[in-house]
Amino acid sequence: MALSVLAEENILLNQQLATKEEAIRLAGQILVDNRYVEADYIEKMLEREAMTSTFMGNFVAIPHGTDDAKKDVKESGISIIQVPDGVDFGDGNIVKLIIGIAGKGGGHLDILSNIAITVSDIENVENIVAATSAKSILSFFERVN
């Protein structure tokens, strides 16, 4: 049975993270724990971040693995971490919503597109950061599954 791309167990509310590395590791660990990726994928997410920041604006970062990390992806999946107090992603870019992505085949492009549409509206981001349940966060990303 295929996993849902985004499920309630992939969402963490009200986290406090000290560094972007901690944030990326946590986003990746959720994907590992829920069987979307192999553990090596987390290092590839950090490698990708070192190449260029995954900060997207609107308090959002979308960490994901390098191209050669595709071998570590078992199923397309998304993790979402809500960080109301924010975490610095460098250059003063504060992130309050971390969306970890692992895409199987070309599937991640559709996922990214749907996420981009949702988070391009700052009001959506503010509502997601203020959400009090994983279920309410899921409602913002219904098109992803």
Image (cartoon, helix red, strand yellow):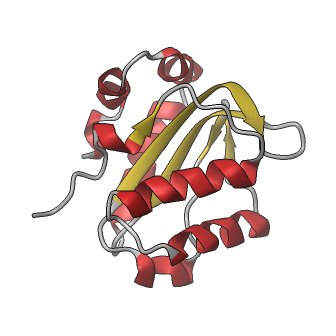
**On the image, which quarter does residue 123 sit in?**
top right
Q: Please, is residue 83 above or below residue 37 in the view?
A: above
Residue 135 appears left or right of 15 = left
In the rendered image of this protein, does residue 57 appear above or below residue 14? below
Report the residue that reaches farthest toward the right.
91
Q: How many numbered marks are there?
A: 0
Q: Residue at x 35, y 27 (%)?
A: 134
Residue 54: x %, y % from top left: 67, 53
Q: Is residue 2 above or below residue 17?
A: below
- Direction from residue 69 to residue 53 in the image, left or right: right
Percent coordinates x, y for residue 46 in the rendering = 68, 66
Residue at point 49%, 73% (across, down): 39
127 sits left or right of 45 in the view = left
Task: Give the quarter of the image for residue 72.
Answer: bottom left
- The residue lying at 85 percent from left, 46 percent from top is 90
The residue that appears at 52% across and 45% down in the rendered structure is 99
> Residue 37 appears at what percent x and percent y?
40, 69
Task: Residue at the far left: name it.
Answer: 1
